[in-house]
Each structure stands twice: as structure tokens, then as C-alpha cells.
Image (cartoon, helix red, strand yellow):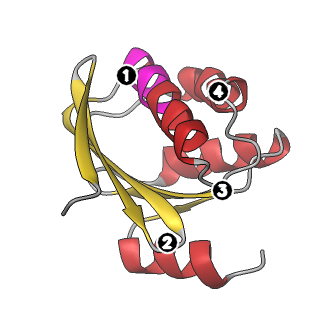
Amino acid sequence: MGNERITQGPGFKIRFRNEHGYLRAHVFGGHDSQQVSTAMWTMIGAECQQQGATRLLVLEELQDIVGDIDVSAISQTMVDVGLKPVRIAFVELTNDITLNEYGEILCLELGIAVRVFSREDAARRWLLYSND
């Protein structure tokens, strides 16, 4: 696809693609950690600002999970990189979504419109058509 590009991060890759009405970011090829998550959201935030994206679909396909203690810092990173005005659908492809649901709550408390999913089709439907 012509509008698709892969960016190398520190220990992972992100495949960005402009879709009709949103930016799609597929994060893959690495192991999750607080450092990886921080770098991932920093790169995604920069891409959203560069593209003027107001809707974002993130598919995370990383091994391992971040511990509970790290989720608050990662949520704050999302605010710091300018993602507050962006509606975000987050799809966890490889791990249990329970920890990401905790992150969803923290982000909502910080004013970020985010929702966690286990399937891309449900995430896309919420991102484009839901008012909640």
C-alpha cells in the first residue's frame, strides 16, 4: 500500500497506515517493557501530530506485558506527547487485556478518550461510529 510505512523503534517496529477517517499503527517485532511502551507512545504521538490525526487505531503485537506499577507512567506519557485530543482504540493482540483495561481507566481519568479491545473490527467500529 502506498500510504504504509514501517518505522523502527528501540526494540520494536511500527507500521503506520492512513485509513479512511483514522491513522492505524501496528506495533510489532519486540518485547514490551516500560521503555518500549514509552518510546512507542512517543513515536505514535509524533505521527499523530504530523498527520493531524484525531482518531487512532493501535494494534499492539508485542511479547511480555508491562507491570502494574508502570501503567500510570505510560498513561502520563500519552498526555505528555499530545494524545489528549485524539480518540484512541487500542487492540491487544497477544496478551490478556486486563492490564490494558486498567490503563484505559487511568487514561480516561487524565482526559484521554481511549478504549481497549481484543479484536480489530470491534475497535474500528467504536472508533468510527460510537459516541461514547
Query: Which mark is first along the chain, 2 or 3?
Result: 3
Q: CA distance from mark 2 to mark 4?
A: 22 Å
Q: Residue 53's x, y, as percent?
A: 59, 53
Query: Which mark is first along the chain, 4 or 2?
Result: 4
Q: Decide if residue 63 is in sight here.
A: no
- Reading the image, the residue beneath label 2 is 123
Residue 93's tag is: none
- Reading the image, the residue beneath label 3 is 54
Name the element at disc 3.
loop
Q: Which residues are magenta?
A: 35-41
Residue 36's tag is: 1
Tell whether 6 sits left or right of 72: left
Q: Residue 100's x, y, as percent?
A: 52, 47
Name the element at disc 1.
helix
Q: CA distance from mark 1 to mark 2?
A: 23 Å
- Which image quarter: residue 89? bottom right
- Kindly identify the amino acid type of the residue bearing the numbered disc 4: Val
- Which image quarter: residue 3? bottom left
Q: Residue at x 51, y 44 (%)?
A: 99
Q: Nearer the viewer, mark 3 or mark 2?
A: 3
The front one of 47 and 25 is 47
Cβ–Cβ under 8 Å for marks 3 and 2: no
Q: Residue 124's x, y, as percent?
A: 48, 75
The front one of 59 and 18 is 18
Q: Residue 7's x, y, as percent?
A: 26, 33
Q: Residue at x 72, y 42 (%)?
A: 107
Q: CA distance from mark 4 to mark 3?
A: 14 Å
Q: CA distance from mark 3 to mark 1?
A: 23 Å
Residue 81's tag is: 4
- Kindly identify the amino acid type of the residue bearing the numbered disc 1: Val
- Kindly identify the amino acid type of the residue bearing the numbered disc 3: Thr
Query: Which mark is first along the chain, 2 or 1?
Result: 1
